[in-house]
């Protein structure tokens, strides 16, 4: 497993949100196209902003807290047909549960619980260098292009 961090939320040329995960040295970036609601939730967590009422990911954190469960890790473990898959590893007492999750939901929760995020070696094959990710003309505006004209979500 390779540890990664949330680098930022960027946008592609059509203004679709793209979650960018990077390795610890920022040498490789994994782009994952996500929905606008998940992007908003992740952005709020990155900024440390909370709204007056809990969002879905805030609610899930509260449920875990009240139940005494902790989020041990998030692992983006697979890619099938252009779709990333993740596992949410929860601990309660001496038990561990592994729950299938969308990467965007798992990461939104991980940011709220300060949980480590990892990618598998298979998923690491989809990482790009920053130069490969950004168009030369768009480096300043952070417009992301899909690798080899394919979107991964």
Image (cartoon, rainbow, N blue to C red):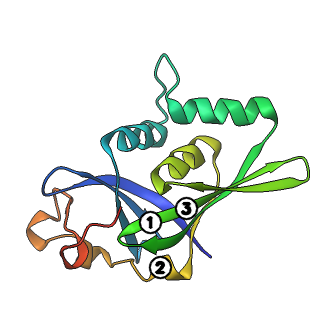
Residue 37 appears anywhere in the view: yes
Across and down, in percent, residue 113 comes to 64, 43
Image disc number at residue 84: 1
Q: Residues within 10 Å of mark 3 (few under 14, many from 20)?
A: many
- Residue under the image location 41 percent in, 77 percent down: 27
In this view, the residue in front, 113 or 91, is: 91
- Residue under the image location 44 percent in, 65 percent down: 84
Residue 24 appears anywhere in the view: no
Per the image, the residue denoted by label 2 is 124
- Residue under the image location 33 percent in, 79 percent down: 129
Per the image, the residue denoted by label 3 is 86
Q: CA distance from mark 3 to mark 1?
A: 7 Å
Q: Are marks 3 and 1 in contact (CB under 8 Å)?
A: yes
Q: Secondary structure at mark 2?
A: helix
In this view, the residue in front, 125 or 21, is: 125
Q: Earlier in the sequence, mark 2 or mark 3?
A: 3
Quarter of the figure that contains the C terminus: bottom left
Q: Are marks 2 and 3 in contact (CB under 8 Å)?
A: no
């Amino acid at each position: 497993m390779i540890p990664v961090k949330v680098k930022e939320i960027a946008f592609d040329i059509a203004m679709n949100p793209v979650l960018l995960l990077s390795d610890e040295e920022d040498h490789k970036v994994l782009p994952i196209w996500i929905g606008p609601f998940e992007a908003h939730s992740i952005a709020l967590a990155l900024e440390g902003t909370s709204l007056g009422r809990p969002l879905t990911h805030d609610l899930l954190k509260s449920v875990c807290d009240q139940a005494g469960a902790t989020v041990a890790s998030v692992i983006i473990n697979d890619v099938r047909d252009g779709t990333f898959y993740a596992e949410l590893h929860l601990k309660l007492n001496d038990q561990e549960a592994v729950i299938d999750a969308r990467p965007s939901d798992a990461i939104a929760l991980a940011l709220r619980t300060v949980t480590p995020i990892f990618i598998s070696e298979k998923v690491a094959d989809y990482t790009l260098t920053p130069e490969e990710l950004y168009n030369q003309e768009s480096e300043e505006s952070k417009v992301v292009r899909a690798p080899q004209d394919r979107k991964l979500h």
